[in-house]
Image (tube, helix red, strand yellow):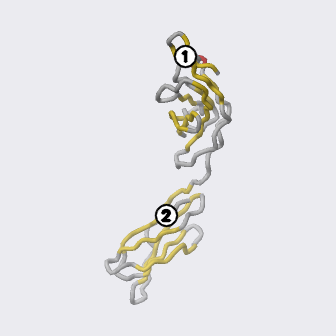
Amino acid sequence: GAPVAFSGAAEALATVRLYDVASNTLLATQLAGDDGKWTISLASLPEGSLRLATTQTDAANNLSAMSPELALVVDKTSPLAPAGLKLLAASANVATPAFSGDAGAAGDVVKLYAGGVEVGSSVVAADGKWEVAPSNALAQGAHEITVRFMDTAGNVSEASTALATTIVAAAGAALFAG
């Protein structure tokens, strides 16, 4: 994951220590500046629930009480790849065909791709079902349609199995041929 930074204010030139309170583990130490401001950057945090707090030790070696805890949850796990990508029957003859599926996690974003380019998005319903269509008409021709889930933490799944589709022009109207 990306580096994570925590910052705050302490006594000028105090030594600030950041702890995982649940495991009583010292994560990092940083010297506050002349103005008392400090920033601690961590390369990453472990997945799961964390309770973080700080202490400061001043120049006279006086140790402060533990700060109030900051509780957070770190989620690095991507959703499972969508399965069962289907064309909605009512979308058979349009240039913006709608696709559906189920087994998503409520609130996850469904991202629709044509040839690896994102062309639309939607949100998974409370029952795990979803529908998604391109925001704009797909160009005439063959398209490899896939979807991915993105969870509320921003983790993105692998792509679904591709569904080969073709948008054709017939009698002045755009038609879909699956």
Mark 2 surroundings: few (<14), some (14-19) or many (≥20) residues within 10 A: few
Query: What residue is shown with label 2?
Result: 4
Residue 12, x across and y down, in percent: 34, 81
Q: Is residue 93 above or below residue 141?
A: above
- Picture quarter with the N terminus: bottom right
Amino acid on which the number 1 mark rests in the picture? Ala
Q: Nearer the viewer, residue 155 or 63?
A: 155
Amino acid on which the number 2 mark rests in the picture? Val
Q: Residue at x 53, y 37 (%)?
A: 118
Residue 137, x across and y down, in percent: 49, 25
Can you tell which quarter of the image residue 131 is in?
A: top right
Q: Is residue 91 above or below residue 150?
A: above
Q: How many discs appear?
A: 2
User: Mark 1 or mark 2: which is in front?
Assistant: 1
- Picture quarter with the C terminus: top right
Query: Quick check: 61 left or right of 168?
Result: left
Q: Nearer the viewer, residue 126 or 32?
A: 32
Can you tell which quarter of the image residue 99 is in?
A: top right
Real-space Cα distance between discs 1 and 2? 51 Å
- Report the residue that reaches farthest toward the bottom: 60
Q: What secondary structure is found at the residue carrying circle 1?
A: strand
Query: What residue is shown with label 1?
Result: 169
Q: Residue at x 46, y 71 (%)?
A: 40
